Amino acid sequence: MAAASLVKAPIGQGLRPAGHNPRRRGGVVRSSLQGAAVGSRAEWLTNCAVLSSKVAALVSHSTTNGHVAAAAAAPNGATLDLVHVNGANGGARNLPSPLRIADLSPAPMHGSELRVAYQGVPGAYSEKAAGKAYQGCDAIPCDQFDVAFQAVENWVADRAVLPVENSLGGSIHRNYDLLLRHRLHIVGEVQLPVHHCLLALPGVRKEDITRIISHPQALAQCEHTITRMGLNVVREAFDDTARAAEYIATNGLRDTAAVASSRAAELYGMEVLADGVHDDSGNVTRFVMLAREPIVPRMDRPFKTSIVFAHDKEGTSMLFKVLSAFAFRDINLTKIESRPHRPIRLADDASSGTAAKTFEYVFYADFQGSLADPRVQNALAEVQEFTSFLRVLGSYPMDMTPMTAGSSSTITSSDSSPAPSSGR
């Protein structure tokens, strides 16, 4: 066989006739070397490089229904017939684009893309807490606490920030019940100083006010201050503080004032008749941050863990045993509270056939410690032996932000720490 009719193939494939059409994987390009004398591997690699560059150039400049056919000259005078192979239907083959890392990335932990649900309307203290928990987030108002839970479960929101207790009003039992009903996880907490103001429409004087509306807790927290102001007013409960301000502004009520935040006054075009009308400057609300998945507990910073447990059998020593499991390991409990779960019927002592109703209780407890701590793991293992039901609501970083009495409730993007509220 003449040297001019042989082409040196890649290593491992021997020699092939010059007219042979090697196929690239996928059948994209065919080539022919007519009368080319290739005497070395270097020349073969050169021809392959030319072929590849010509294909890329011609395909990118094709204007004929995705079809390319051209003749190009190789460096040694051989002719290269370049053909772009079409799909089976005659058109260019449409292949799916590969997934990018952005297509698989989860919702961000912080930043402007995070959607955070809260209960209330813009200007509510819960909105302030959401902004402190996740700076620059997209805050989503919800008309009820249950809606905020469902927003996260149904992927409408990435997180929820909801109040669970106030330093003056105590626990917000509705949200504790919802924590038990839903499967969201506590991933953080935020504590917010509450600063109440008395708001009215522009031009309204204190003497014109005959009614004050706000959330029941907010009214209770301002009761003595409003009385000392000498206002002869009727106090009416409303859904939340900011909604009360919105209601007055929407309906043009010049005989009604609202107890709400200064931010609510800015949003709804109202004036502050009196600033700081709360009875106690130490009024703080604790919020929890909820997510669909728990966070990984750590040991490099203070953590808090929240649990709920119950016992379905009679006995007076269960609670003592549970508390002992923590006390023996020097684990500090910061909260424990019982809630009736459902009534059960018990026969009376006289065995007369009648039945008395009593309640089955669940206990909510918070303690300082991380699930990564072996002491905490051992304590919970012991608690599980004494109870019929145990659930960890979350193990999360504690909010160590110093509380500042009378701090403003206006949302600012520079806030770098979490905080909660009362009166929603």
Image (tube, helix red, strand yellow):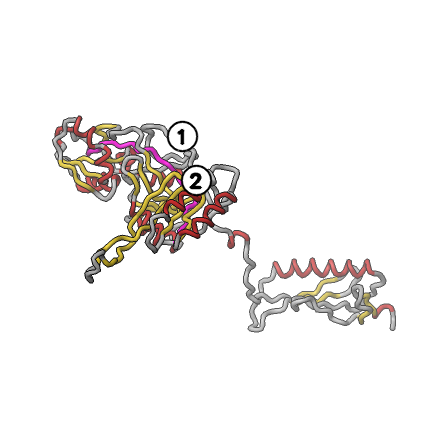
**Is residue 62 visible in the rendered structure shown here?**
yes
Badge 1: residue crowd in 10 Å (few <14, some 14–19, many ≥20): few
Task: Give the residue number, with chain letter if any, for mark 2.
Answer: 327
Given this view, does label 1 or label 2 mark the residue nearer the observer? Answer: 2
**Is residue 115 visible in the rendered structure shown here?**
no
Classify residue 321 as left or right of residue 265.
Answer: right
Q: Is residue 67 above or below residue 379?
A: below
For label 2, the SS is helix
Task: Give the residue number, with chain letter if any, for mark 1.
Answer: 402
From the image, which quarter does the N terminus lie in? bottom right
Q: Which residue is at the front of the view, 306 or 309? A: 309
Magenta stretch: residue 232 in it?
A: no
Tell me the residue at 55%/54% (across/down).
100
Expressed as whole percent of the image width and height from the top left, the position of residue 70 reads 67, 65
Q: Earlier in the sequence, mark 1 or mark 2?
A: 2
Q: Which residue is at the front of the view, 57 or 244? A: 244
Expressed as whole percent of the image width and height from the top left, the position of residue 92 reads 57, 67
Magenta stretch: residue 187 in it?
A: yes
Q: Amino acid at mark 1?
A: Pro
Expressed as whole percent of the image width and height from the top left, the position of residue 250 reads 20, 42
- Predominant SS along the magenta part: strand
Q: Is residue 91 above or below residue 282?
A: below
Tell me the residue at 27%/53% (across/down).
359
Magenta-colored span: 183-201
Expressed as whole percent of the image width and height from the top left, the position of residue 88 reads 58, 73
Q: How far separated are the C-alphas under marks 1 and 2?
A: 27 Å
The image shows a total of numbered marks equal to 2
Q: Amino acid at mark 2?
A: Ala
Name the image quarter holding residue 218. Answer: top left
Badge 2: residue crowd in 10 Å (few <14, some 14–19, many ≥20): few
